[in-house]
Amino acid sequence: MRIPQKVIRFVAWWQESPRGISVVARVLHFIFAVRRRLPGPKGILLIFTGAVGDMVSLSPVLRELARQHPEIHLGMMVKGAGTGVSVKGCPHIDRIVEFCIYEDTRFKWWEALKAICRITRRRQYETAILTMGTGWVPQYRVWGLLLLYASGAKRRIAFRDECAPWLSASGPISVLPLANEVIDATEPQRTERFLGLFQEAGLLSPPLCANTQVWITEDDLLEVAQLDDCFARTRTGKPVVLIFPGIGSGPGKRWSAGRYIKVIDELVAVYGARVFLDGADRDRPLCRRIAALTRNCTSLAGSHSVGALPALVGRADLVVASDSGPIHIAAATGTPAVAIFGPTDPRIWAPKSSSVIALRITDCPPCNNPFFCDRQPPFSCTADVQTADVLQACRRLLLARLDETEGRNKSAVQCGE
């Protein structure tokens, strides 16, 4: 047997076999536990495996940690580049390191080792907290817990329901103390759930304010200004509408493109709206196809970074999207938004904001699984949201927005007089 084949088999053993994973996890835990005992500044490490919307839901925790414990250094490990970019302007985080172990990575332990080495280069973290965010499949949950254990932190905190695959596992992994403080979730809504975790762990007292927020840098504002000068409000005061037709994790969250076209045509005809379609690079063909079939509509998909998204959403008069990150960003910026829900439960995943209308019309109980549906036709829960439902919600929010704008204009005129 040639050496390359032996190496390949060894790599497969140490990141797929429970015994191999257990050995490597113990070694890393020992190494970084020794580093933790060295003299130097200590801090709190957040291991975050959620998406951009979950990061927005976590923002009150970051703000309160900085307010209540200004002396503690806060480090964060985030999954993927997009999530890290979304908090690059956050003044409460001392260091952000990205890791990639959930995708099709050949050397997952090597990626984890690089991330842990980078985050512990200047700090020794005595407390590590795992915040999963979105509902990951069991093997992903186990990898998040392994990363928590490998950090070598003395206190390793996680939710009980996120520890379920490890607590019910058999073999060498089940005997590892991946998390030594397991906390039961008391609140279903994401922001309240995150705050409850830190309060139960004794790291936070009740917050003064639980409103979410986003952090916008000067580079983000400059990037948005260079996108399209017609994105700014026109002299006629027509509303600017931002629509995300393809974004959302899982096919079950995505609404029909034909219905988006009807909504756009109605908004343009009735309100003279200037509509912009947005999304990631993979959404570019869909956005271009919809823009070609409508008028007064422009596609911005794939033309800006994730970090510029809050600045973009903050300039709009209305946002329309499925259950996804832009809805949470809209709530944080105060931009009115219509959120289309299907398999996910808005009581859990929708932001708590009076400016967001969450639409879920179906009688089908939420399964919170946007990837698989055993009903026929599949994901009828999302299809049950009709065009008329979305237009009615848009009309309500736009009228409130126009009334608010007129009130400000009248006040400005009176002050000028």
Image (spheres, rainbow, N blue to C red):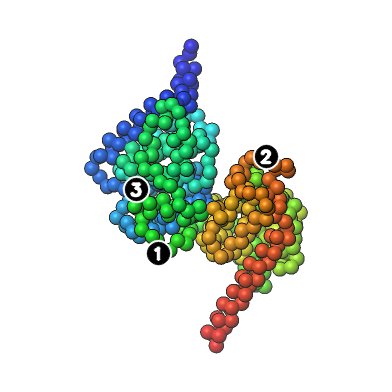
Q: Position of residue 412 (x, y in %)?
A: 55, 81
SS category of the residue bearing label 1: loop
> Badge 2 is on which residue?
374
In this view, 9 is above or below 83: above
Give the left or right position of residue 24, taking residue 394 as reference.
Answer: left
Give the left or right position of residue 404, taking residue 150 as reference.
Answer: right
Query: Closer to the N terminus: mark 3 or mark 1?
Result: 3
Q: Position of residue 363 (x, y in %)?
A: 67, 52
SS category of the residue bearing label 3: strand
Q: Badge 1, how many Cα within 10 Å: few under 14, some, many 20+?
A: few
SS category of the residue bearing label 2: loop
Query: Closer to the N terminus: mark 2 or mark 1?
Result: 1
Q: Nearer the viewer, mark 2 or mark 1?
A: 2
> Badge 3 is on which residue?
44
**Looking at numbered disc 1 in the image, what kind of residue is underneath it?**
Leu
Look at 56% across and 65% down and name the residue there: 354
Cα–Cα gap, marks 2 and 1: 44 Å
Q: Badge 2, how many Cα within 10 Å: few under 14, some, many 20+?
A: few
The answer to which quarter of the image holds residue 397 is bottom right
> Badge 1 is on which residue?
208
Q: Nearer the viewer, mark 3 or mark 1?
A: 1
Q: Badge 3, how many Cα within 10 Å: few under 14, some, many 20+?
A: many
Asked whether residue 218 appears in the rendered view, the answer is no
**Looking at numbered disc 3 in the image, what kind of residue is underneath it?**
Ile
Query: Closer to the N terminus: mark 3 or mark 2?
Result: 3
**Looking at numbered disc 2 in the image, what kind of residue is underneath it?**
Asp
